[in-house]
Image: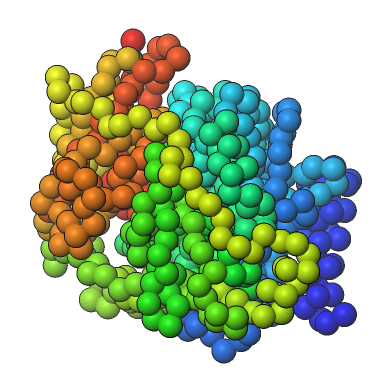
Amino acid sequence: MTAPDQRRRSLVLAIAAACAGGAGLGLWWRRDAGRAAATAAPGHGHASTGATAPATMRIPGERTGLLADLRPSGPARLQAVAAEVEVFPGKPTTLWVYQGCEGGRSCLNPTLHVARGDTLDITLHNALAEDTTIHWHGLQVDEANDGSGLHPVPANGERRYRFEVRNRAGLYWYHAHPHHRTGRQLQMGLAGLLLVEDDEERALREQLGLRWGERDLPLMLADKQVDAHNAIVYRDEADDWIGNRVLANWSPEPTMTVVPGLYRFRMINVANARVLRPAFLHEGAPLPVRLIGTDGGLLDQPRIVDDLFLAPAQRADVLVDFGAVPAGGRVLLRSLDYVAMENEDESGPLAPDLMADHPGAVPMGDALDLMAFHVESAQIESAQAEGIAVPPVHVPDTLSSLPPPPDTAGWRAREIRLSMGADGEWLINGLNFRSHGHHPAFEVKRGSREVWDIRNNMTSMPHPIHIHGVQFRVVSRSISPPDIRARQVVDGGLGPQDLGFNDTVLVWPGEIVRVAIDFSQPFSGAQRYMLHCHNLEHEDMGMMLTFAVVD
C-alpha cells in the first residue's frame, strides 16, 4: 500500500470510528481550526495546472467521505465542523463541512437524495466557532426553513429544518448563508448537493438507462485559492474571490476514464465568484451537448449547444456522447474565454493589482481547463465484456411536461436595479444590506404574480441574481451583449438556458432581464426572503435585499 493510500485509509477509519462512536468529533475533527486555516496569508500559490499527476474524480456512492450518497428516510443530523481532508497531494487540507452519519458511514457534504412530496427533516448542529446555517438553495420553503442569515445557528447551537419538498425533480444544493460570512464559509467548503426526483425524472432515467454514479454524475465545479501548504486562503472584504486551483467534485483538475457512449452530467458552479463557460472539446472542437435541464429541472425538449455560461449557483443538466471519440481519445472540459465585462468605475473597490490576492490564478474571462476525459480501448473492451450498453442511447424528443412561459399581460411589474454607489458599494434599488438590514425593502402579496425587470448598469459587472423561496421563468432579455444575443433560440432574446425554471439568472452590464414569478405558496403570515447577487463577495458586502411575501 502506498503512503497516500495508507493516509487515506487512516482518515477513513478515523471518520468511521467517529460515526460508530456517535461522537461526531474524532481524531480528524477540530472545532477551532477553521478560522485560522482560512486566514492563511496569500502569496504561495500553485499554478492552475500543476506538475503533479491528475487526480481521479470523486464520484458519489455508498461510501464515506466527500459527496457520499445519503438517502434520509426520517429525521437526520448534519454537523458543521472543521475536518482535515486529503484534497491535494501531500498535506491534508482543513475544510469546513457538513458531516452526516448513516450506518456507521461518515459522509462529508453528503449528496442528499429525496423525492418530490417527501418531508426533509434535518437538524444542524454547529460545531464551528461562528454562526452558520443551511440554506436550501432553490427549494420553495417558508422563511423558517430557508436557512438564510435571518435565522443564524450560533456556535454550539442547533436548528431543525423540516419541510415538504415541493420542487420538480432536479439538482438543487445546500450551503451556508450567514450574513457577511457566506463567501468565507463556502470557500472553506460548506456546500453539498441535493437531488430531487419525481415521476418524470424516473421515466427519463429508465429511458436513458444511465445508472447514477456510473454514467449519470454530478460535476460540482469550483476554484479555490490554495497556498504551498495546501491551505485554502481567503481574505474578508475582497471583491471577486477567484482561485488558483480548479476542483471537480473536490478533486483537483481530475481525469475520468469513460466508455464511448452517452453520459449525463449534472453541472453546478459552486465557485465564489468565477463565471464559467464550459465546453467539451475533442481536438479543439466542441462536442455537441444536449442541454436537458436547468436550475429547476428538466426542459420540455433537449437543446443542442456547443457551450454554456454557468455563473455561481447555476446548474445545467447535460448529455454528452463520447461515442464519436476514437479509442485513446481525450476530451477536455474547458471554460472558454469570454469578455468578462468588469466595467466597475475606477473609483470603486478595485485594487491597482486585481490579481495580487490570487497568485497563480487565471483571470476572470480567460480560458481555464477544468478536467479531462479519456476514452481508452481497455475500457471499451471491458465494457463490452461486462455487457455495458455502449451503443448510442435513444434520447426522447419530449423530456417533461414543462409548461410554456406564462403570458404576463396584466401582471404587476417591479424594477430591480443593480448598480455601484459613489463609495464603491454594490446596490440593489439604491440600497445596501449593511445599512438596510433585515427590514423588507418591499412586500409582495401571497398568491400574486409579478414580473421583475432586473436592470444592470453598464458601469457594473455580470451579476448572478438569486431569489430565495421561488422558481421563476425568464421571459425576455434585452440590450444583451453580443455573445448572449447570439444564443437566442426563441423570441425575446432567450437562449436555451432561459427556457426552464430557474432560481439564479446572470445579468450582464447594460442588460435588462425580465423574470416572471408566481408567489402562490401554502404558507401564512409574513415570510421574509433574500434577493441577492450570488457573487458571494458582493453578497457579503451588502448586494442583498430582504423582501416579504404577506397575506
Residue located 39% across and 43% down the image: 301
Q: How far from the left and from the top, in percent, is residue 45?
A: 48, 81
Placement of 122 over or under 303, stated as above or below: above
Q: Is residue 204 visible?
A: yes
Placement of 198 over or under 85, stated as above or below: above
Q: Is residue 254 visible?
A: no
Judge from the rendering whether residue 521 lies leftward or rightward of residue 464; answer left or right.
right
Placement of 300 over or under 117, stated as above or below: below
| Quadrant of residue 298 within the rendered picture | top left
Quadrant of the image containing the C terminus: top left
Residue located 31% across and 42% down the image: 499
Placement of 226 over or under 75, stated as above or below: below
Judge from the rendering whether residue 271 lies leftward or rightward of residue 365; answer left or right.
right
Residue located 35% across and 29% down the image: 403
Outermost residue toward the bottom? 51
Judge from the rendering whether residue 123 lies leftward or rightward of residue 300; answer left or right.
right
Residue located 26% across and 21% down the image: 449
Of residues 449 and 273, which is closer to you in this image? 449
Number of marks? 0
Quadrant of the image containing the N terminus: bottom right
